[in-house]
Amino acid sequence: MSIRLDQLAKSFDSLRVVKTTSLEVEDSELFVLLGASGSGKSTILRLIAGLSAPDSGRIWLHGRDVTDLQPQERGIGFVFQNYSIFRHMSVAENIEFPLKIRKVSRSKREERREQLLDLVGLGGLGNRYAHQLSGGQQQRVALARALVHEPSVLLLDEPFGALDVKIRGQLRRNLKEIQRQLRVTAILVTHDQEEAFELADRVGLMERGELLEVGEPEALYAHPRTLFGATFLGAGTVLVGRAKNGAAKLGSLSLPIPPEVEHEEDARVRVLVRPEQVALSAGAAGAAGDEPPEGNLLGHGTIVEQSFLGALRRVRVRLPAIPGTRQASPAVYGEESLLMDAVIPAGEDPGGFEVWVSLKGWHILAPPRPRLLACDFPGEGSPAPFSLLRGFEGSLNARVSLLSVTDKVDRVAALRASQTERAASHGLPDAEPVVRKGDPVDEIAAEQVQSLYDFLVLSMPEKGQGEILPGVLSALSTPLLAVQGEPDSFSRILICTAVGEPGKADVRVGGWLARRLGAEVTLLHVLVDGGGPAPWVKAHLDAGLATLRGLEVTSRTVLRPARAAVQGILDEAKEGGHDLIVLGRHAASRSGGRVRRHDFSFEILAGSGKSVLIVPPGQ
Amino acid sequence: MIGRRHGAGLPVGMLVLVLLPLILMPIAAVFVFAFGGGPGEFLKALRTEDAQFALRFSLLIAFLTAAINAVLGTWAAYVLAKHRFRGERPLAIAINLPVAIPTVVVGTSLLLLWGPIGLFGKLLEPLGLQPMFTPAGVLLAHLFVTFPYMLGSVKPLLDELEVTYEEASYTLGAGRWQTFRYVILPALKGGLFSGTLLTFAHSLGEFGATVMVSGNLRLRTQTAPLYIFAQFEAGKVAQANAVAAVLAALSFVIFFFLLRYSGKERL
């Protein structure tokens, strides 16, 4: 193992530039860190080089812990984007510099210098100075200088970024040859996907300080796990459908989900289709003699755009809305219709503007990491429930965002900084601070809408419900976890289908949580009228149980007679030792958009003293 | 259409006419008057003990000032260029202030600080140390007055130097000192050279601060400019002119070097 990064993390001021990252690079591997600017890829390189110190984590080079060593003690070679050739030294002196520092004899130095000059193809240019060389030549000098002392690891920071396309391609091939020849382990940082594919043995994809995916270029292209991976590497369309009986449903099309992709019945499934996997065949819908083609037909559409790419032609087709299907990428706003990109050989004619679109191949993405938005209002007696968030970060593999709200503009930066510190001190260093300006209730509502979260987490102040909860409930679009006490997980979950319309959403969200937390579920129906259960209740409970069993959650149903629904729920929660109560929330408990103080949810919260998960409809 | 060469004679002629009494003639006058009595008189005037001392003392002080401020100024420039800190701008302005303050004022404040009744002076007095009215006092004044020249020559070069220059050196195996010695310092060569010459030249001609702190003691603290002034006051114009001519000649030499060097840099 040449390079091992163990739980490395780095912040600048309050900005988390590198989130807890671990990585291993094999001997003589050429590893490419790929990401947009500001994704933290260069910072990782600088941490390895020792030009910047990590906040936490260790760095190992060839089995040696170098975390606390100075850059000059690490035995690395580093190539900068701006070359950084020493201007007052000739090319020869530049290349000999590392050897001179190491007190290598003059004859050895000269011999080695000539070797390196030949290696990078600059033989005979030793007497030149930087200003007499082209950019490409300067970068070759930088490479020779970084390699002359036989470093154990070569680090390259966007080495071709400042060069024009033609020279870039040539240098790339040279670099790969040289790296192969010397068998030196190398990490190269770039934002250029083509460069990554061409050079890399393996690619690490970075986004916002996080190493999202690591893999060989072909594997990453064909089987990305994340939406970012799917869209950043290469073109394609990502469609979102639902899982039904082990297949992703896109309208009438069923694409089997391979067993290795984790999925849940009825959950959203994202399907990536690369342009080369889209087949087009001419034909007007409904016209006589124009039969739709066989196999994996997605639909019928019209060509809206064509561009000639040399050997290939890119064709963009618009398809009318397909029920239960939407498009996640490329983003289409305010439209129900889908846009599919296809590539066909440039010589081929799609044959008219109306085409049948079918899929020759596809890839099903892994479900995204759940995202939690936790409100952190220590001033209002409602700090974020850190112990639970830590538990969720582990068991749910969740991303946590911490929301704070201020009414003063000039406090935003300071608040963000203190938020980051606060999160780190509570064991959540990778939590994302979200600071909004305005009224807490409005901002919680706005943040839910602007970013997609799976749960909203709010601790209940010890004295009373606080001022926030009623407002939050009236504009709830995300399941709200109202936390009481200091739980770190939940093991017994009570899902109540007691009043109003029975909701599928509460069972699904509660079951989803139970599955990941390894919790048991009790499905409760309270019989208020004293008689037996109505037939629809029975049917509903059976359906709920079936859903939970499908999720492999240990579950049972309870029918409990009580004088009032609230009383029944509170009694069951107490007797059953439940630590989380799940309530469906529906139109009936709202009145004119405002939530009344004696709302059902408040009674349960106040009466039970336990955490409550409130699921709005349409989840 | 404005021709560049066409009709240049008139404006150039007028410029020369205006500059003649202002700049060109005074320069020539120094030498004309110095050699007015012939080379014999000139040499005789230079050979007096007082003149000899004043010239040597001035050269020595200029030399020391240039040497000390070369180190001090480079160090200050390096620290200022490399580190970002609170109060960086006010400090940079304060350091550059000596060019703007009238030198006589500098002399007064030095006296107030280091003089027998000054803040430091009072503490040093019992130890038998008394920098004012001694060569040390003169040096102190010159260091103060010429400090910004070194900084001004070196700092822009340091600011221009890419951060990665230093980092590249570290990654190639050089330590802090080696990086400074082999990578940074050579890159500053031009600034160091011109800064040192500027400091030297200004020290050589310094008058205002020197006259205050030196006490103008002949054969002890009298620099060449002070000598010239003293001789003039005493009506010995020939003595004054001889030393003045030497000072002027020295300045020309320094100026010539500066010109040549900056010319080369521009290539």
Image (spheres, coloured by chain):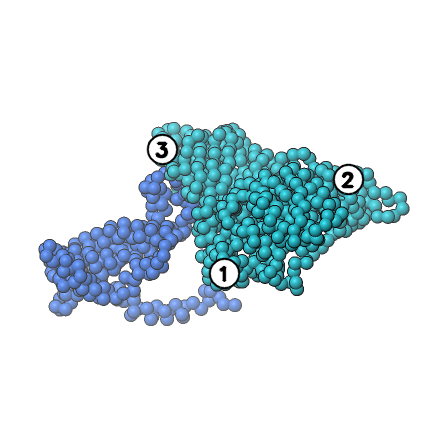
Chain colours: A cyan, B blue
Query: Few, some or many C-alpha atoms within 10 Å of disc 2 (few <14, some 14-19, many ≥20)?
Result: some
Q: Position of residue A281 (x, y in %)?
A: 80, 43
Q: Which residue is drawn at 62% across and 42% down?
A: A521
Q: Mark 3 points at which residue?
A: A102
- B258 to the left or right of A498: left
Q: Looking at this view, is A20 or A509 the one in front?
A: A509
Disc 3 to disc 1, how far (Cα)?
A: 56 Å
Which residue bears the numbered disc 2?
A: A296
Q: x, y (%) of residue A77?
A: 44, 36
The amino acid pointed to by label 3 is: Arg
Report the residue at 46% width, 60% height from top. Answer: A411
Q: Is A300 situated above or below A99?
A: below
Determine the CA span between mark 2 and mark 1. 52 Å
Q: Name the residue under label 1.
A: A406
At numbered mark 3, what does the secondary structure look like: helix, strand or loop?
loop
Q: Between disc 3 and disc 2, whose residue precedes? A: 3
Quarter occupied by residue A395: top right
Q: Is residue A371 above or below residue B124?
A: above
